[in-house]
Amino acid sequence: MDDKLYQAFIAEIKKLFSKNSVMVDTLADILRIERGAVYRRLRQDVPFTFNEIAVIARHLNISIDSMIGLENNKNVLFQLQFMDFKSPQETDYHLFNIYIKFLQTLNKEDNSERVSIFNVLPHDLFYGFDYLLRFYLFVWNYHSLKDKSINFHHALIPPEMSRLFNEYMMEMKNFNKTYFVFDNGLFRFFVDRVHYFNSIRMVEKEDVSKIKEDLLSLLDYMEKMAITGQFKETGNAVNIYISDIDITTGYTYFEAPTVHISMIKVFIMSYITSYDRNTFEKTKSWINALIKISTLITLTNEKQRVLFFENQRKIINEL
C-alpha cells in the first residue's frame, strides 16, 4: 500500500473514533497486540501488515474498494458478524467483547441515541429473563445446526457467553435516549414458536411454564417502562411507540456526534450493519416515517397503552 493509501486508511480509522485512546484500545483488541505496537503503526514507525489491514477493515467495516476508487457510489457495504452461540470459540468471545466495548465508547458521548423498530421481542430486553434468552439461542441453534439440534431443556448458555450477554443487554440501556417502535403482535412470534417446538417435543411442558412466567414478567417490566419513561436499571429515557401498521422487518440506528450506524435484523440474533452515512440517513428517514404513523404510549395515551399490554397478555396466556 503506497503512502497516500496508507494515510487514507488511517484517516478512515480515525473518523470512527472521537478519542485517540479509545481508537488505540480498540485496535489493540482487534489485532491482539500491545497498545505501544498500535502507536508505532499509527506513527508509521512500523507499517500495518496486509493481514492487519484486512482484519481492521473487516472489524470496522472500512471499504478498501472505496479508498482505491473501485466502488460504485450506489453500492453500500454491509457487514455481518455471524457468531456461534452454541459452541463459541475464542474468536466469538473476542468479537462480542469488541462490540460491547464499542457500545461503551458510544454511550460515553453526549446525546447518544438508539432507535429501533421491532416486530419480534428484542433480545436486548431479556436481562434477568434467562428462559427467554435461552429460547432465542435454542431457536438459533435449531436453524443453524439442525442436524445437531438438542432439546431445549438441555440447551444451556455457556457461563462466559451468559456474562457477555448480560453486559451487552445492560449496555443497550445506557444510551442517553432510546426509542422503540413495536408491532401490535410483538409477542406473537415468540409464543407461536414455543407452541411449535412444544408440538414436536423439543420443548417440554414444564419448560413452557417457565417460559410463560418469564414472558409475563418481561411484559410487566415493559409496562412499567412505558409508564415511567425510563429503564429502571439506568434511569435513561425510553419512549415506546406502537405501530398502526404491521412491521415486516427490524431496523435500528445508533447516533452520536461522531457515530452514525444503521442495522437490519437477520437470523434471529444477528444484524447486518452499515457505517455508510447515506445509508444511515435513509434508514433514519424510513424509521421516522413509521414513527409518524405510530402511537406514543410512554407517559401518555393511557387507554392505548392499557389495550396494548392487555392484548400481549392474551397472546402469552395462550401458552
Image (tube, helix red, strand yellow):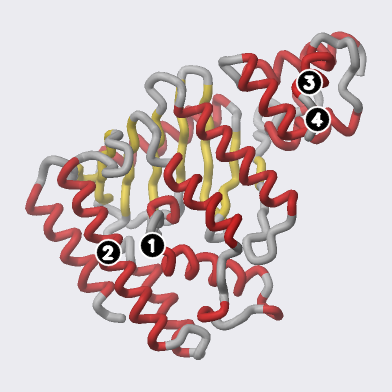
Q: Earlier in the sequence, mark 1 or mark 4?
A: 4
> Viewer-nearest of labels 4 and 2?
4
Residue at mark 1 to residue at mark 2: CA–CA distance:
8 Å
**Circle on res. 129:** 1
* Residue type, mark 2 in image: Ser
* Residue type, mark 1 in image: Phe
Residue at mark 3 to residue at mark 4: CA–CA distance:
7 Å
Residue that badge 4 annotates: 33
Q: Position of residue 171 (x, y in %)?
A: 45, 40
Q: Is residue 229 above or below residue 73?
A: below
**Quarter of the C terminus within the rendering:** bottom left
Viewer-nearest residue: 226 or 30 = 30
Q: What is the crowding at mark 3: few (fewer than 14 residues within 10 Å), some, or many (at least 20)?
A: many
Q: Earlier in the sequence, mark 3 or mark 4?
A: 4
Q: Earlier in the sequence, mark 1 or mark 3?
A: 3
Disc 3 and disc 4 in contact, CB within 8 angstroms? yes
Residue at mark 1 to residue at mark 4: CA–CA distance:
37 Å
**Circle on res. 38:** 3
Left or right: where does residue 155 sit relative to residue 241? right
Q: Earlier in the sequence, mark 4 or mark 2?
A: 4
Residue that badge 2 annotates: 217
Q: Earlier in the sequence, mark 1 or mark 2?
A: 1
Disc 2 and disc 3 in contact, CB within 8 angstroms? no
